[in-house]
Image: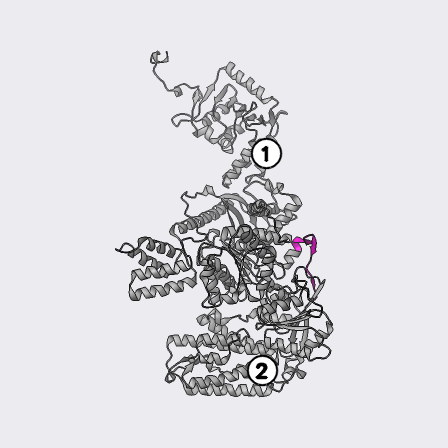
Amino acid sequence: MYDQQPERPLRSIREHHAPDGVPYILDNHAEGMLLDEALRRLMHTSTWADIATGYFALSGYALVAEALEGLRELRLLFGESRVGEEIARDLRRERYRARTQALVERLLAFLQRPPLDGKEAVQIRRYGEGGGGPGFFHAKAYIVQGAAVVGSSNFTANGLTSNTELNAVHRDAPVVNDFSAWYERMWNAPQALDCKAELIAILRRSQFGDFPYTPHEIYIKTLYEYFKDDLEQEAALDPMRSVVELAAFQHEAFQKAQRILRRYHGVMIADSVGLGKTYIGKKLLELFAYYQRQRALIVCPAQLREMWQRQIDESRIAATILGMEELGRSDFPVAQYADAEFILVDESHNFRNPQTQRYQNLSRIIASGEPKRVALLTATPINNSLWDLYHQIALWTRGNDGYFREIGIRSLRQYVKEAETLGGAGGALFNLLEEVVIRRTRAFIQEHYGEMTINEQPLRFPQRAPLQTLRYSLGDTYHGLFGQITSAIENLELPAYNPESYLLAPSANDKLRALTNGGIVGLLKTTLLKRFESSVVAFRRSIHRLRSFQAKFLEQLRTGRLLHSGAHRRILRLEEDDDPVGLDTLLESLEVVDLARYRMAAIEQDVAHDIALLDTIMARIDPLGPEADTKLHCFLDALRSLDTAKVVVFSYYRDTAHYLAAQIAATPDLAHRRVAVLSSDTPPRERQALIERFAPLSNRTRIRVDAGAELDLLIATDVLSEGQNLQDAGYLINYDLHWNPTRMIQRNGRIDRLGNPHALIQISNIFPTDDLEALLRLVERIQARLNAINETIGLDASVLGELVTPRTFNTLRELAAGDESSLIYWGQVSELAGNELMRQQLLAYLRAYGAELVRDLPGGIHSALRRGQRQGLFAYYRYQDRHFWRFYDTRNHYSSDNRFEIHELIRATREEPRAEDWLDAAEAERILEVLADDILTTLHEQRGAAALGQTLDKVQRDLSQIVRAGWAAPGVDRAQAQAVFSALRIPLPATFLKDLRAIAARYQQEKDYGLLLALLQRLFDAFQIASTPTNALSPESEPLTRDDLELVCWMLIG
């Protein structure tokens, strides 16, 4: 029995060893010899070695490299049939180190040693096909002259040093010979296949090898790894039966929009005009409202309601349609729409001003209840500045400035501010745009998609004839009075719009209001000049209206009434034809003031001065009739040349539009033309009827339009410039100067659309020949004063309206000369594009060569590209599903994460050769580690921010403290208090902050805690606000280490 054996004294097995000091048992325990040291000693006295191992690692080679290199012959037999894959994976996991690269170079040199005496110095084979079957090879043996080490250790660093192993060292000649015979049998077995060339290729092609990867391979690998997940997700999307047919490029946008909406709850589809954004939006509605049965809300301009109603009726989509004008009501019932789950906003650029009632009401709808998905459609997301884009995106970020922290944008507001400072240059917004904006231009679609079809029918763009400029004399139209009239406009004082400048003892706030009102005066003068250029009729009406207002203002002032800021804005809208409110009604609402505070004599003197100037202008322009209107006759001549063709005519002002229609009817040889006017005073249903009568084909009119009722000439204001399909027409005439280039693009897009049946379209602009430059200089002077005021105090966006920017003046000058380059600029708006170009570059490669080549490129590889203007290192790191591109400028020693700039630097063709590595491995390693540390810092900051919670406005923080401090008091409904507290702890849009400030002010006055809870509860209940922020980062518990970052690839740029 084993338990009856006599006790024997135990002695250390390490006491038994040969003269060379190698023990007979090797188990890697710290007090004994490690296997790597034993192998070095055994190989020192041998000229050859035969090694059998289940696995091989570069780390194992590193420990005994010098000893191996001292041998004349080495045979290495692997047991892992997928040894190539294993080694490649191990090399991919390795961080880039100069010493690792040197080690790989050393191993390659060793493997490729020249033969000795006609015999290969290094031979490598792998045994069997793996998988644990009969051929599985799991032996471990290290055989040299006079000794054999047999046991459990693989040829890896762990196997040779740190794992607890059991290896026996055999020195008896018969035993060693038996092991050698066994090895010979295994080496020559049919399953033992030569894999040395494979190993050399893997090492050479790894990130540490010397394979000369081209810049194009690094470029394509970058794109492939960056888009791979997106492409796989899109391919995995369930194809749904659909009645909404899309062209290929539209379907790609639909798929991308789905992905963006899932991640960010919001997307902006900003394709250029005429590319079918409506159909992409309709497909999203079909997905969310029809298939997923979500409650859907469509927000659009009033003139597009009928179009959207028709679209959803055709597809049996249940959705509520809400006109933007309805949203502008101060008593708009927000709670009625708070349960919407998917919101589509068409022509979303109309929500670029957060001060407007329509913006605030839509913001409340989106922020109410559970997080919603929001799709914005616009061809012109930027009108005045990058802040236009910011405010539209802010609709769905719900007041969370750190919404995009996960993609490296710590503060959305600061990010846009910095981009605005740079003027949008260099793709300053690219990292944001590629995440949430889908933007393709017509030229992009034509270049990358070629022939397109819908329902197997070809789909083409019309060709645009060269831009036509029609000339007339502005001076002759006004009978040589140009200088006198424009001088009079510039010299108007307009005290009615700036009474604060006449205060005897103005306060600081009064002085600020005076500056603001000075901006309003400038805007009014600009509007008068616009109407002056538009038509004598439009200008005449403005002068009469202004003269009447000045007189009535003086009457009201003598009774103690003054204008207020709301009245200012209504008068400006009245001048722009957007507001039907009359002056008499407006004057009745003026505030009563103390006249003793004002310099009344100065006010009366300046009003009298203005009335005299206006009387002079009226006396000069009232006699002017159409017979001397050179602009009108230029227009009529153009119509004659177009014979019976359908023509769209745009004017800024309805007075001008009606004037043109009347003059056509009064012209004998044009009176047969079937003409209609469409402007802001045309009822919505009548608008739709006129559109269908003018363009029945484009609008797929369901009721047949009789030939006698079909229109061939439509004169419209910019109420028609958005969203309408008018491509039955092949001609468009812009009657006025383009004071807003983005509106010009929208106008042109009514006929310059995909699917236009005309092979060629013509767009014409009417420009004055003689006084254009003088007019532009005058408007520039007024705008310069307005801009100075804005820079001093920051005018309210609702006051500024659509600024006439320096770029606008350049555009007008270029268009007058027939130069269309500005059209291209405004169409693209400072490279306002996402990553579509990058994506198309990859897709073109995959179509031509397939995915296998790029898929097989190892991780961590690099190349070098010659770029004379910049010098540095590009690195692409990945952490889970997060992608980090960095460029380190080695001349100026700074790093950039702007993917637009980086893409332009690394973009390479197949023909571009690889440059020499101009940076040594140690310096490359240092830079790669600097960039990796920067990325880790960013990730740690994001985790820290997630743990701390999102940034809250001061009023939310203050109210939170008050609520929390009081909920333990007797009689307090603690559950209610905690629910209110939770709702206060999520970022809220600015529109709700106003409500909170009012509640906080009331609490400070009354100190009634119960009332405070009731008011907060009422607010949160009304808009279904709960603690459910969108896109909130969740804290992660596992610490990040450098090994969590994977180096995908890198490239030297120089």
* Picture quarter with the N terminus: top left
Nearest the eye: 9 or 605: 605
Which mark is first along the chain, 2 or 1? Answer: 1
The residue shown at (28%, 63%) is 1007
Residue located beneath label 1 in the image: 200
Where is mark 2, residue-wise?
Answer: 540
Per the rendered image, the range of residues in magenta is: 447-466
Distance between the Cα atoms at labels 1 and 2?
87 Å
| Left or right: residue 851 compared with residue 52 | right
> Is residue 706 at all visible to an observer of this figure?
yes
Q: Where is residue 45 in the image (x, y as percent from the top left)?
A: 50, 22
Disc 2: CA contacts within 10 A as few (<14), some (14-19) or many (>=20):
many
Element at label 1: helix
Q: Magenta stretch: residue 665 in it?
A: no
| Image x and y of residue 1005, in percent | 30, 67
What amino acid type should be assigned to the residue bearing mark 2? Arg
**Residue at (68, 78) in percent of width and height:** 665
